[in-house]
Image (cartoon, rainbow, N blue to C red):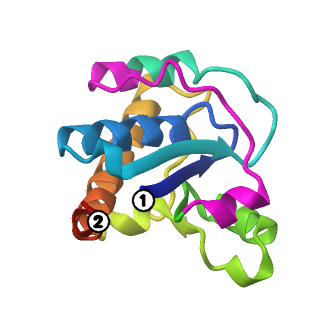
């Protein structure tokens, strides 16, 4: 059975689709793509059905990730129940997801950056509307955390193979 991971940001058009694309690519490169179900969502419904923002698509593509086919959707309480890992981009998203979660699963959502090295950075800041450098900074943090997440899950998924 595949390990399911949901990445969550505000509108599901910058950070979370980037994390979905980064983790998917890293899993494919590790020969573990079939071991994961990977998705992303936003805490808000503002951009439901829309593709990632053009700068997010461009910056991801410049690093070898194709996120252009992803479409924004809003997280539900069922998502928190269904996914094995529900990973927030910021502490604000974490609070929102804990309110949305069934009471017995309120501690299930975690910060994506908790899987990265101890950089003293807890949140992946929203690059939306900012310069390309903001998108570069966000994807850099996402790559580091996704690498750590994949490394932490390899022993678990290899047992299932």
- Determine the secondary structure under disc 2: helix
Using the image, determine if residue 139 lies above or below residue 122: above
Which of the numbered marks, if any, corresponds to residue 50?
none
Range of the magenta residues?
A: 59-83
Answer whether residue 129 is magenta in the image.
no
Using the image, determine if residue 96 lies above or below residue 132: below
* The N terminus lies in quadrant: bottom left
Contact between labelled residues 2 and 1, with CB atoms less than 8 Å apart: yes
Q: Quadrant of residue 129?
A: top right
Residue drawn 58% across and 60% down? 83
Along the viewing direction, whichever of 75 and 89 lies nearer the viewer: 75
Using the image, determine if residue 36 lies above or below residue 156: above
Residue drawn 68% across and 56% down? 79
Residue 48, image x, y percentages: 76, 29
Residue 28, image x, y percentages: 26, 38
Quickly name the residue at label 2: 160
Residue 118, image x, y percentages: 30, 71
Q: Residues within 10 Å of mark 1 (few under 14, many from 20)?
A: few
Answer whether residue 81 is magenta in the image.
yes
Along the viewing direction, whichever of 2 and 19 lies nearer the viewer: 2
In the picture, measured across the screen, residue 91 lies left or right of residue 156, that is right
In the picture, measured across the screen, residue 153 lies left or right of residue 122, that is left
Along the viewing direction, whichever of 77 and 58 lies nearer the viewer: 77
Name the outermost residue toward the bottom: 104
Along the viewing direction, whichever of 124 and 6 lies nearer the viewer: 6
Mark 1 and mark 2: span between their CA atoms?
A: 7 Å
Which of the numbered marks, if any, corresponds to residue 1?
1
Residue drawn 63% across and 26% down? 71
- Determine the secondary structure under disc 1: loop
């Amino acid at each position: 059975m595949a390990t399911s991971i949901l990445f969550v940001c505000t509108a599901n058009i910058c950070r979370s689709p980037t994390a979905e694309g980064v983790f998917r690519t890293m899993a494919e490169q590790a020969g573990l793509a079939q071991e994961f179900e990977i998705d992303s969502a936003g805490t808000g419904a503002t951009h439901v059905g829309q593709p990632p923002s053009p700068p997010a698509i461009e910056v991801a593509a410049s690093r070898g990730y194709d996120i252009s086919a992803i479409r924004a959707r809003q997280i539900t309480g069922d998502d928190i129940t269904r996914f094995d890992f529900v990973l927030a981009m910021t502490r604000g998203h974490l609070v929102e997801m804990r309110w949305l979660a069934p009471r017995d699963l309120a501690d299930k959502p975690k910060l994506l950056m908790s899987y990265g090295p101890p950089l003293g950075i807890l949140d992946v800041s929203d690059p939306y509307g900012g310069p390309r450098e903001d998108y570069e900074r966000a994807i850099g943090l996402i790559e580091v955390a996704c690498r750590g997440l994949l490394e932490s899950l390899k022993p678990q998924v290899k047992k299932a193979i």
